[in-house]
Image (spheres, rainbow, N blue to C red):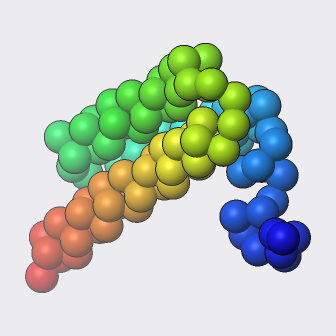
Amino acid sequence: MTDPTRVRSQPALTSSTGLIWIVLGAVLAAICAGVLFALVPLQPVTAWVGLVLVVVLFLAMVVIRFAVRVGRRRLTAMASVFGGMALVTLACVVIIAGAAWESLS
């Protein structure tokens, strides 16, 4: 018996077609790209690397959607890539903020 209140039991990870992950992934990728693009003047290399990684991760999400069979494995992989996009952006923002903070000292 599965507990419907568990995070792993939600429909987005059990019975979705994956379209919601593509839509939310596109929204997150746009937000991440906007943030990183705004930070290009402060640390161009870090910001561009982050931008490229976000785009590559979004493209990986699309490939997973069409290359992996329907089921929990595909949805888990898409959710993991979604989280990866957020983590890459967070890491780049922290690196850029740290460098900017150091330059103020």
Q: Quadrant of residue 41?
A: top left
Q: Position of residue 90 (x, y in %)?
A: 40, 61
How many numbered circles are shown? 0
Q: Residue furthest bottom?
A: 105
**In screen coordinates, is 34 left or right of 10?**
left
Q: Position of residue 46 (x, y in %)?
A: 22, 46
Q: Can residue 40 be seen in this view?
A: no
* 21 vs 5: above or below: above
Image quarter in which the C terminus is found: bottom left
Image quarter in which the N terminus is found: bottom right
Q: Quadrant of residue 45?
A: top left
**25 or 74, which lies in front?**
74
Q: Can residue 103 be seen in this view?
A: yes
**73 or 54, which lies in front?**
73
**In screen coordinates, is 85 left or right of 72?**
left
Identity of the residue drawn at 80% across and 39% down = 16
Q: Position of residue 72 (x, y in %)?
A: 66, 44
Identity of the residue drawn at 17% across and 66% down = 99
**In screen coordinates, is 47 left or right of 87?**
left
Q: Residue furthest front?
A: 1
**In screen coordinates, is 18 left or right of 43?**
right
Q: Where is residue 83 in the image (x, y as percent from the top left)?
A: 51, 54
**26 or 33, which lies in front?**
26
Identity of the residue drawn at 14% across and 75% down = 102
